[in-house]
Amino acid sequence: MLVSGEASMGRVSGGPAKKRPRDGAGATARDKVLLHGLQFFSYHGVADEERCLGQKFIVDVELGVDLKRAGKSDDIDDTVNYAAVYESVKDSFPNEHAEARVQASNLVEHVAEGIAEKILRAFHGVEWAQVTVKKPHVAVGGIVDYLGVQILRTREDDYADEDLGGSIGEC
């Protein structure tokens, strides 16, 4: 019987126990490391004003990690150091204007993809990364808290031949 989207654990026809799929991505980590409400100022965007004046971005990151060992050992080496993850995310939002103009992305989709890739490459205990990038100050002719994207990437996703860089013209 399925409960809350989780497959039951157990043996099928005497075979080995199945891992529990999680979060719709086939990953098995039931535990999460959470970083919510990270705020950065940078120059990502399609509009000239976004690239010249910059804007605020809010990022949420959820990482699928088996935290059982860390829960038992109380040793930071048995988990994902969220301070190091924060620094990795922060690097995706250069805020010095000259530096940011070279590294800026047009789309928040591109920014989110780059964050997920960095995390999955750098933190080997992470089975999946869900990244949300929000733009609270967008020109859309209505009142919104924010607009943005949320992506979910797993270790099975391949980034080998992709260029995740970006650049902009003159202000």
Image (tube, rainbow, N blue to C red):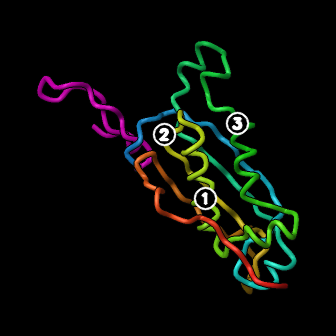
Distance (Cα) linking label 1 and label 3: 17 Å
Q: Is residue 143 left or right of residue 98?
A: left
Query: Callout 1: few (<14), some (14-19), or many (20+) C-alpha neighbours within 10 Å?
Result: some
Query: Callout 2: few (<14), some (14-19), or many (20+) C-alpha neighbours within 10 Å?
Result: many
Q: Tag 2: residue type? A: Glu
Q: Tag 3: residue type? A: Tyr
Distance (Cα) linking label 2 and label 3: 15 Å
Disc number at residue 127? 2
> Residue 33: which quarter of the image?
top right
Q: Do the residues labelled 1 and 3 touch (CB within 8 Å)?
A: no
The mark tally for this picture is 3
Secondary structure under tag 1 reads: helix
Distance (Cα) linking label 2 and label 1: 16 Å
The residue that label 3 is drawn on is 82
Q: Which quarter of the image is occupied by the C terminus?
A: bottom right
The residue that label 1 is drawn on is 114
Residue 70 drawn in magenta: no
Q: Residue 95: give x, y in percent of width and height.
A: 85, 62
Query: Callout 3: few (<14), some (14-19), or many (20+) C-alpha neighbours within 10 Å?
Result: few
Secondary structure under tag 2 reads: strand
Secondary structure under tag 3 reads: helix
Q: Are marks 2 and 1 in contact (CB under 8 Å)?
A: no
Q: Is 54 situated above or below 15?
A: below
Look at the image and give the residue range highlighted in magenta. Answer: 1-24
Circle nearer the N terminus (1, 3): 3
